[in-house]
């Protein structure tokens, strides 16, 4: 029997338990999935919700539900602290609703110290699983229904990819698609390779088939997901490049926009730039994490490019695709970073002019090489550097974003404006947000919009 068929059997079994539970409650049991972290986790949560809906749960947004799942992130320590804090609140809910079940999954659960802490201090948790066995969710649920104590199932790694399990999308018109899992880069500060395992690419045929299915179901924009999409396909039995995959995806009729995340600068090929340049569907946006502008720090980070190589790459991209928006991630406070190193980072920001940049304070992750490096930077110096970087990033981003003022561009409407229900919010190809008058019926459609006023990071416009 295939793994997929096994899991479908468990779903049937779980359905029986949920139906019985519903009968006892006199209503459908409710469930809430809360996601921390990146798009990979968001996509994983859609898979969890797909299974929960299939077996009969009603999905709600409130955490005071019959079943609560935290899909966790551990990339920086504050992500972990948030989870511990909120677990306290869940414990309060559970005291009032003793039949409530609590599950934890995701990257944080791949750390043995975390499991130990939950075992000893958070005994009210019912189920813990990791990033490698999420396809087993139905089976684990059955174990929870059948057992009393805490169910813990964590795998160290896997090469298994189980296709075609149920997925419930958050947005009807756009979707993330995993094209690969894991990471082999081992940047010295980063915990992702330890909690997500080795790099595995999905078969391109499975990817295309999934996207075709999504398009048939109303999806117009997709985001191809991987920690380093530029190394996609290298380890497949029939190797294929990321650029070739993009060309195949482009051919899918009815698909309007293609995005991808994330590109490691060291692996970004000329072939990819060329494919992007000639594409009518690939969005004019590239997220190209810099991390630091200092070659000394980049070397210590094991990023495997220099400041000069990064700058050359950006120049090449801008030359070939002038209307592209480039965004980035920056870490301040990596061990050994001096104010001169921060100046190098500022220099890159000034020259590249990012449309947006996510700036992070370095967070020590136990088990990574950087955690045991001497010369950790003092909190004071980190703060000084961080403020400088943030200020410059905001200035240049404002200037960059404003360069479209007065133009007419295509916008995909994503939702009704949160603060003003007579407006909708959409996204340009280059990822900039635009608000313009309209109602719910526009959601999921593309419109030509005139960009009238630039407000820093977004535009106010009108439909033309
Ligand atoms: N695979 C992606 C990054 C995934 S993590 C890439 O290489 O671009 C997202 C971002 O979190 C990273 O780009 C980095 O800027 C930040 N990050 C990762 N580990 C961190 C740490 N220990 N402290 C602070 N920021 C970190
Ligand atoms: Fe982390 Fe580097 Fe892999 Fe990105 S490429 S996930 S930063 S190790
Ligand atoms: Fe966090 Fe895991 Fe993503 S650690 S950033 S959720 S891959």
Image (tube, grey):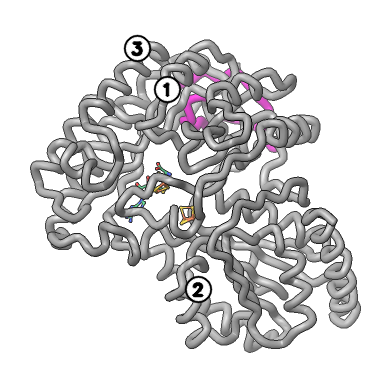
Q: Is residue 160 visible?
A: yes
Measured as percent of width and height from the top left, residue 415 is found at 62, 40
**Distance of label 3 from label 1 (alpha carbons):** 15 Å
Disc nearer the start of the sequence (2/1):
2
For this rendering, which residue is in front, 292 or 198?
198
Q: Residues within 10 Å of mark 3 (few under 14, many from 20)?
A: few
Q: Secondary structure at mark 3?
A: helix
Q: Which mark is residue 212?
A: none
Q: Which residue is rendered at x = 44% and y = 46% of the image?
A: 184
Mark 1 element type: loop
Q: Secondary structure at mark 2?
A: helix
**Quarter of the rendering containing residue 102:** bottom right
Q: Tell me where the magenta segment starts and ends, as one range.
A: 429-453
- Give the residue at mark 3: 319
On whether residue 300 falls in the magenta region, the answer is no
Instruction: Report the Cα–Cα distance between label 2 and label 1.
Output: 43 Å
Above or below for 395 versus 333: above
Residue 176 visible here: no
Q: Nearer the viewer, residue 166 or 27?
A: 166
Which residue position is annotated with label 2? 86
Local packing at callout 2 (Cα closer than 10 Å; few below 14, some 14-19, many 20+) is few
Q: Earlier in the sequence, mark 2 or mark 3?
A: 2
Residue 212 on image: x %, y %: 75, 30
Residue at x 40% of width, y 30% of height: 267
Dot 1 surroundings within 10 Å: few (below 14), some, or many (20 or more)? some
The answer for how far apart the CA atoms under marks 2 and 3 are is 48 Å
- Give percent across and percent down for residue 121: 48, 86
**Within the magenta stretch, is there residue 446?**
yes
Q: Quadrant of the C terminus?
A: top right
Percent across and percent down for residue 330 are 29, 43
């Amino acid at each position: 029997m295939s793994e997929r068929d096994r899991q479908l059997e468990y779903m049937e079994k779980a359905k029986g338990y949920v139906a019985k539970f519903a009968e006892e409650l006199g209503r459908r049991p409710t469930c809430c999935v809360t996601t921390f972290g990146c798009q990979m986790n968001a996509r994983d949560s859609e898979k969890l919700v797909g299974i929960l809906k299939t077996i009969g749960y009603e999905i709600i947004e409130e955490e005071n539900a019959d079943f609560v799942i935290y899909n966790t992130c551990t990339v920086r320590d504050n992500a972990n602290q948030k989870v511990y804090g909120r677990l306290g609140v869940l414990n309060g809910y559970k005291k009032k609703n003793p039949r409530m079940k609590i599950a934890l999954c995701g990257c944080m659960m791949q750390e043995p110290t975390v499991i130990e802490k939950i075992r000893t201090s958070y005994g009210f948790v019912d189920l813990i699983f990791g990033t490698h066995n999420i396809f087993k969710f139905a089976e684990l649920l059955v174990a929870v229904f059948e057992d009393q104590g805490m169910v813990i199932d964590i795998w160290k790694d896997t090469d298994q990819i189980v296709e075609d399990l149920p997925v419930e999308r958050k947005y009807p018109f756009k979707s993330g698609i995993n094209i690969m899992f894991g990471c082999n880069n081992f940047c010295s500060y980063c915990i992702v390779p330890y909690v997500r395992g080795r790099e595995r690419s999905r078969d391109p045929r499975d990817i295309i088939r999934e996207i075709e299915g999504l398009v048939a179901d109303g999806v117009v924009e997709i985001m191809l997901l991987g920690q380093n999409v530029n190394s996609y396909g290298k380890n497949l039995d029939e190797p294929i490049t990321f650029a070739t995959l993009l060309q195949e995806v482009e051919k899918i009729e009815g698909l309007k926009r293609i995005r991808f995340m994330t590109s490691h600068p060291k692996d970004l090929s000329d072939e990819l730039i060329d494919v992007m340049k000639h594409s009518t569907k690939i969005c004019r946006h590239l997220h190209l994490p810099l991390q630091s502008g200092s070659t000394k720090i980049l070397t210590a980070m094991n990023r495997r490019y220099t400041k000069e190589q990064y700058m050359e790459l950006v120049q090449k991209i801008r030359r070939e695709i002038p209307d592209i928006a480039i965004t980035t991630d920056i870490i301040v406070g990596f061990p050994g970073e001096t104010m001169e190193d921060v100046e190098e980072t500022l220099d890159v920001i000034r020259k590249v002019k990012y449309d947006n940049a996510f700036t992070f304070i370095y967070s020590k992750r136990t088990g990574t090489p950087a955690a045991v490096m001497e010369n950790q930077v003092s909190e004071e110096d980190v703060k000084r550097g961080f403020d400088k970087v943030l200020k410059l990033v905001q200035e240049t981003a404002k200037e960059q974003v404003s360069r479209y003022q007065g133009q007419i561009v295509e916008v995909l409407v994503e939702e009704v404006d949160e603060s003003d229900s007579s407006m909708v919010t959409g996204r340009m190809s280059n990822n900039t947000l635009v608000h313009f008058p309209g109602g719910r019926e526009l959601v999921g459609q593309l419109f030509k919009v005139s960009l009238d006023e630039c407000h820093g990071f977004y535009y106010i416009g009108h439909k033309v």
